[in-house]
Amino acid sequence: MKKAVMGIVMLILVVCAPAQAFALTAIDFTGVTTDFTNGSWSLGFEFTTNQAISVTHLGFYDDLKNGLLESHSVGIFDVTTTLLVASGTVGNADSLDGFFRYTSIVPVDLAANHAYRIAAVTLQDNYTWGTTGYVVDPAITYTKDVYSASGTLVYPAQSDGISNAWFGPNFKFDESGNNAVPEPASLGLLGSGLMGLIGFNRRKRK
């Protein structure tokens, strides 16, 4: 009986423990064909969420993977121009993953089947387009490039409809539910089972 009780306790602990989350990269590529800068822009890309996601990191393109000239503001807007996520800065102190340096943020949930625009202020650093080995995570759908001429982070209102975005920005995310707390009903069933075993054990001892 003790083994049965311990088994229920372990089951509760497993159910209640958050699952390990792995940050996924929104868009990745293996190489580039064009790097340039021609003034400062608030630029990036529009995407649609195919499922609910939680943004955990915002990134900026490091062309030679050897450091940035300046720190860069990065943000995600909804299509009504509301700024949802603003990172402060992405700079040389942030970790490099592929062609991007990423800063972690307090996770922000994006709803499924909604359109969003991510933008970064380029300042003096290069940005790129025409990448090779271009891969989009299936949790999102890339829509088009977006941009506005600006030295600060603003809604990127214009687009040329380019199918291989301006980078600029990128982000990492977790699939929603990775850290979900079990529903109260599930906990209630587990608790009832545990109490039933304890009661049965007491009656058996009498």
Image (tube, rainbow, N blue to C red):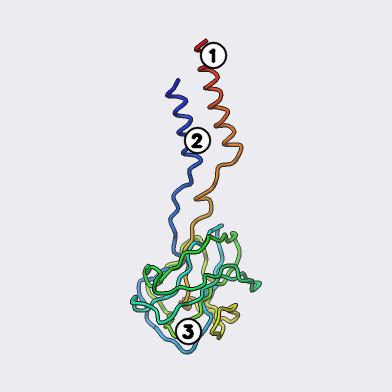
Q: Which residue is mark 3?
A: 123
Q: Secondary structure at mark 2?
A: helix
> For numbered disc 1, what is the local secondary structure?
helix
For numbered disc 3, what is the local secondary structure? loop
* Residue at (53, 50) in percent of width and height: 177
Find the residue positioned furthest to the top: 206
Label 1: how many Cα within 10 Å (few below 14, some 14–19, many 20+): few
**Label 2, residues with CA under 10 Å away: few <14, some 14-19, many ≥20:** some
The amino acid type of the residue labelled 2 equals Ile
Q: Which residue is nearer to you in this view: 20 or 175?
A: 20
Q: The disc labelled 1 sits on which kind of residue?
A: Arg
- From the top left corner, tell me how far across and down residue 175 is, in percent: 50, 55
Instruction: Identify which residue, 66 or 50, lies in the foreground.
Output: 66
Q: Which mark is residue 203?
A: 1
Give the percent coordinates (x, y) of residue 145: 52, 77
Q: Earlier in the sequence, mark 1 or mark 2?
A: 2
Write the residue at 60% across / 80% down. 157
Give the spatial CA distance, label 1 vs label 2.
24 Å
Residue that numbered label 2 is attached to = 12
